[in-house]
Image (tube, grey):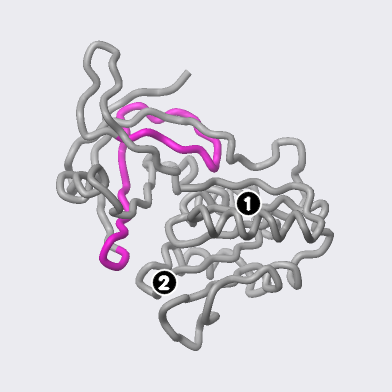
Amino acid sequence: MATICKAIVKSVKQYGEDVREYILLPDKYNFFDPGSFLQLSLEEPQCNQWPESRNFSIASFLNEEKTIRLIIRKVGYYTTRIFDELLVDSVCYIKYSFGDFLLPFYDKESPIVCIAGGTGIAPFLSFAEYLESENKEGRLHLFYSAKSIKELIGESYLNNLLCENNLSLHLTREKNRLFKEGRITINHILKNIKNINKAHFYICGGEDFTQKFKNELIAAGAENVYSDEW
C-alpha cells in the first residue's frame, strides 16, 4: 500500500538553468526499492482525493537522515510551478513508492549496466547507493551523458564510488579533457561488458534515446533489457 505524507524541502541545488535537486524530509519514511518513483503534489490531499501531481524517480536509497532525493527538470506548466513554489522549508505532498524499474531480485551477481541521458541518472543514483550499501558497487557499470559539466548530477559521488572501467561520463555540448566528448554509442557499451546475455541493462532517458539503445542491445544479443522513458 502506498504511503501518503507531507514532506519538507530541506535543500535545493541548481544544475544548469533548468535542472534542480530537491532533498525532501517526509513525515512518514517507509521502505522503498531502489529504482522506485513517487508522485509529488503542491496541494494537500482532500477527503482521500489525490490532487494534481507529477511522477519523479527517487534518486536516493534509504538513509539515516530519512530523506528522499529528487532530480527535476523544468519542462512544462507543473514543473515550472514546482520551481517557483518549492523552496527551502516549503511543504509538498508525496505518494510512494511505485514502479517496476527495479534491480533483479533473483540475480545478485551479474553486472548491472545503466545507460542514462540527462536527468535519467535519477534512478541509477538510487541503484548506486543501494549497491554501495550491499558492498556490491563493483557490479555497477554506468554510461551517463549530459549536455554540460553543470548538468552532470552526482559526478563526484560516482567518480569516488566506481572504478574508471565502470564509469563512462559523456558531455554532448561541451568539451573537457576529463570527460568523453559526444554521445554514448553502443560500441562504448559493448566493448566494456562481457557476457552481455547475462548482464542486466537499464536505460533511462528520452524516448528516442531509450528506444535506440533498447533496439541496439537486443540486436547485439542482450537478453535482459529494461527501460524507463520520460
Q: Residue furthest top?
A: 47
Residue 197 vs residue 26, the one in the foreground: 197
Indicate the secondary structure of the residue bearing disc 2.
loop
Query: In the rendered view, does 151 fall on the left or right side of 8?
Result: right
Residue for badge 2: 147
Indicate the secondary structure of the residue bearing disc 1.
strand
Residue drawn where x is 59% and y is 59% of the image: 115
Looking at the picture, how far across and down is residue 22, in whole percent?
30, 49
- Eyeballing the image, is 206 above or below 98? below
Q: Quadrant of residue 151?
A: bottom left
Q: Quadrant of residue 210?
A: bottom right
- Eyeballing the image, is 65 above or below 96? below
Residue drawn where x is 61% and y is 40% of the image: 102
Residue for badge 1: 202
- Label count reads 2
Looking at the picture, how far across and down is residue 87, in whole percent?
17, 48
Disc 1 packing (10 Å; few <14; some 14–19; many ≥20): many
Residue drawn where x is 60% and y is 54% of the image: 211
Disc 2 packing (10 Å; few <14; some 14–19; many ≥20): some
Q: Quadrant of residue 68?
A: top left
Looking at the picture, how far across and down is residue 178, in whole percent?
50, 84
Part of the protein shown in magenta = 15-40
